[in-house]
């Protein structure tokens, strides 16, 4: 599944970098962020369904990941050469912090949704409050990559202390899916904010600014011609 996101990033990075060198980094960056925006929205709507849809959503996110080259170009060309090393270091720190905080926030949302929804879902199946609370706590604590890897690795049997129950499994699976969707919805909102902010603040190159001015002049000319024609 991760290959569906990794391959577009590998292909998109150099491609977006070349396009940025030709027309400036603003438009490629916004297109890349737009791909992430679409990908997170698509994942939030389709997670839990056909696995191919998840791969499509991850592919769009991967294409957006290739936009790092354009963002780096914006950052490195907006400062003087004597501060290039400092800027490069800050970019690396920001990427590391963004990944760490992103995993922490989305993982916390996943665990919170599981904790809030699973108890009510299990109530018809487990009448005892203490037992149900213990089951919910166990599932919530195990909603992380390490726990999942120990349970679902290829050919790896379930531990002896783990008991399978189809109804409990279905309830936990539905709750887990809801948590993933909630985390992806938050990611969509954060990326949307980044897109709007970037659209307003990303610097324009001379070529893009000239193209925008030419487009505005053309639109004004067409409007004036329409008014004269109407008169």
Image: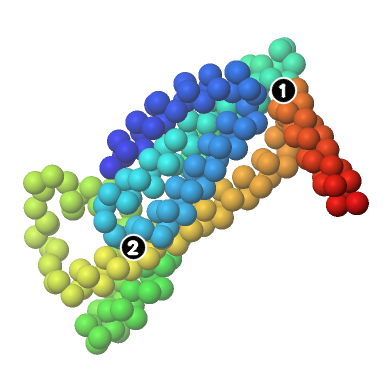
Is disc 1 surrounded by few (<14), some (14 to 19) or many (20+) residues within 10 Å?
Answer: few
Q: Taking 30 as reference, is 176 above or below it?
A: below
Residue under the image location 51 percent in, 57 percent down? 186
**Which mark is drawn over residue 123?**
none
User: Is disc 2 surrounded by few (<14), some (14 to 19) or many (20+) residues within 10 Å?
Assistant: some
Give the left or right position of residue 212, taking residue 166 as reference.
right
Q: Where does label 1 land, which residue?
A: 207
Between the C-alphas of marks 2 and 1, the distance is 46 Å
Residue 12 percent location from the top left of the image? 44, 28
Q: Secondary structure at mark 2?
A: helix
Q: Nearer the viewer, mark 2 or mark 1?
A: 1
Image coordinates for residue 173, horizontal then vertical, percent:
26, 65
Q: Residue at x 22, y 82 (%)?
A: 125
Check the image and report above or below for 58 versus 212.
below
- Mark 2 or mark 1: which comes first in sequence? 2
Please identify the quarter of the rendering in which residue 172 is found: bottom left
Q: Please identify the quadrant where the N terminus is shown.
A: top left
SS at badge 1 = helix
Q: Is residue 157 left or right of residue 109?
A: left
Q: Position of residue 115 (x, y in %)?
A: 38, 70
Q: Is residue 189 left or right of residue 160?
A: right
Q: Which residue is mark 2?
A: 177
Residue 164 visible within the image: yes
Q: How many marks?
A: 2
> Looking at the image, which residue is at 53% across and 36% down?
32
Residue at figure coordinates x 91%, y 51% from the top left: 231
């Amino acid at each position: 599944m991760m290959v569906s996101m990794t391959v577009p990033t590998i292909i998109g990075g150099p491609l977006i970098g070349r396009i940025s060198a030709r027309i400036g980094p603003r438009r490629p960056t916004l297109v890349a962020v737009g791909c992430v925006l679409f990908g997170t929205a698509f994942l939030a709507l389709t997670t839990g369904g056909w696995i191919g849809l998840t791969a499509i959503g991850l592919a769009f996110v991967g294409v957006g990941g290739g936009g790092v080259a354009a963002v780096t170009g914006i950052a490195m060309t907006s400062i003087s050469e004597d501060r290039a090393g400092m800027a490069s270091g800050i970019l690396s720190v920001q990427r590391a912090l963004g990944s760490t905080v992103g995993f922490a926030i989305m993982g916390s949302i996943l665990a919170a949704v599981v904790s809030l929804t699973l108890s009510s879902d299990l109530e018809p199946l487990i009448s005892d409050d203490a037992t149900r609370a213990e089951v919910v706590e166990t599932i919530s604590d195990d909603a992380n990559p390490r726990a999942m890897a120990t349970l679902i690795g290829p050919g790896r049997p379930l531990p002896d202390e783990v008991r399978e129950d189809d109804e409990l499994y279905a309830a936990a699976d539905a709750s887990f899916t809801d948590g993933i969707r909630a985390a992806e919805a938050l990611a969509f909102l954060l990326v949307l904010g980044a897109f709007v902010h970037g659209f307003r603040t990303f610097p324009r190159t001379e070529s893009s600014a000239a193209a925008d001015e030419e487009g505005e002049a053309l639109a004004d000319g067409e409007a004036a011609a329409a008014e004269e024609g109407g008169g």
